[in-house]
Image: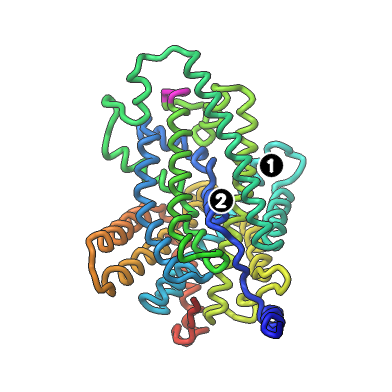
Amino acid sequence: MTTLATSHASDRDHPRLQRALTRWDLVLYGVIVISPVGPLSIFGVVSRRGHGHAATIVLIAMAFMLLTAVSYGRMARAYPSAGSAFSYVGQEISPSLGYVIGWSMVLDYLLNPLICIVWCSQQGHVLIPRIPYWAWAAFFGSVTTGLCVQGIKTSARVNAILAAGLGIVIAIFLVAATVYIVRHPHTGAGFFTLPFYDPQSWSIKRILGATSLAVLTYMGFDGISTLAEEAVNPRRDMLAATVIACVIIGILATLEFYAAQLVWPTQRYPDLDTAFTFVAQRAWAPLFGVVGLTVMVALIGSGMAAQLGVSRLLYGMGRSGALPKAFFGALDPKQHVPRNNVLLVGIVAFAGALILPALATEATGFELGANLLNFGALIAFMGVNAAAFVRYYLRAERKTIINFLLPVLGFFVCLTLWWSLNTQAKILGGVWMAIGIAFGAWRTRRFGAVRFSN
């Protein structure tokens, strides 16, 4: 009895993240943050660039991302702490590189809720023009922040509801597309293989070029690793949940793209960015509005999941001393969440949603945000692959070809994709990294004061 009372008193005095997430909670989180309807926004561009081979392209992209997903899952199993890639690289390679990777991840996770607010606010303003863009941004920022502050189990339940809703809309589209295809004439059995392989338009160069864009479909799977300290059994569940989430999204994206290509076989769309909504309308007219609203709801869920991830990352960096511990390393004693970080991210995301569109020169504000997100994400992915290579190959007693090839291939795939980002994203991302590295070096006495926790 005394021991139990002491334990409860310790939790009150030194609150910790609550281990409440099962494997399927983690999978649902990953599916929501990646978003099963996320591929819909890039369908038109992928289809046009790949000359109609969208289904094949999204499968290739899944294979590329699974390389890094395996590295993330294995490292999360080895280091079940809230710092994610920051901890992996810091402990396996060096604290200074760990900080660099952690700072790049902050950019990645911070931009995710930000661009979700941008897209949803723009769509809301189109639907109801009387409400200004800034008011929509304040509304969506408040919704995601309010849900994140309620605690990890509340967020997990919201994720489950969102996943169910998105699944229903996707199922309705697939049924409508099937009915449309059956009722309309086509050119024989070969018609059904064209989304995967059309000998008249197949081009390896175009396929690989479109794959660099289709990889965006899977961005966000790494967020699962930030919840390792809140998983019931992280050493068993992290790798499985990460891979399962990627495969689920890959299968759904392939089905969506395959059905869409059969409904609309050409690559001539009324509008390239919203091509999928026109495809859905052709399959069944009411789906035009339904799909648009569904993407908005999905992005709210994705933004919330990303906000959860970045708040845990900042908590890990604060607890280790890389950021001010009194603020970033604090937990709410009741909800067991890093409330300071959640609120800070919400404020920054709202402010960024107002500022980012004005900064964009080479693309729209949403596109610039997406490129900046990839700038941070791909640096973190390279770091995790490097950490997995060091731990499971260089330091392993028994060296295997699999432990060599998987992280090395994952590293160079991410490096190639990072190199292809547009110039403005590289410049702004470089400024972000320079500021963060300078601050970290000053605060931690050249990173000597950084301490990691498992």
Give percent across and percent down for residue 386. 33, 67
Query: Looking at the image, can residue 288 be seen?
Result: yes
| Numbered disc in front, either 2 or 1 | 2
Viewer-nearest residue: 264 or 169: 169
Q: Which residue is found at the position 45% from the left and 83% from the top?
A: 447
Give the residue at mark 2.
28
Give the residue at mark 1.
124
Q: Secondary structure at mark 2?
A: helix
CA neighbours of label 2 inside 10 A, class few (<14), some (14 to 19), many (20+): many
Amino acid type, callout 2: Leu
Amino acid type, callout 1: Gly
Is 418 in the magenta?
no
Q: Quadrant of residue 298?
A: top right
Q: Which residue is found at the position 59% from the left and 22% from the top?
A: 284
Give percent across and percent down for residue 90. 42, 76
Name the outermost residue toward the right.
130
Q: CA distance from mark 2 to mark 1?
A: 26 Å
Q: Quadrant of the N terminus?
A: bottom right
- The answer to whether residue 216 is above or below residue 450 is above
Magenta residues, start to end: 262-266
Q: Which residue is found at the position 58% from the left and 24% from the top?
A: 281
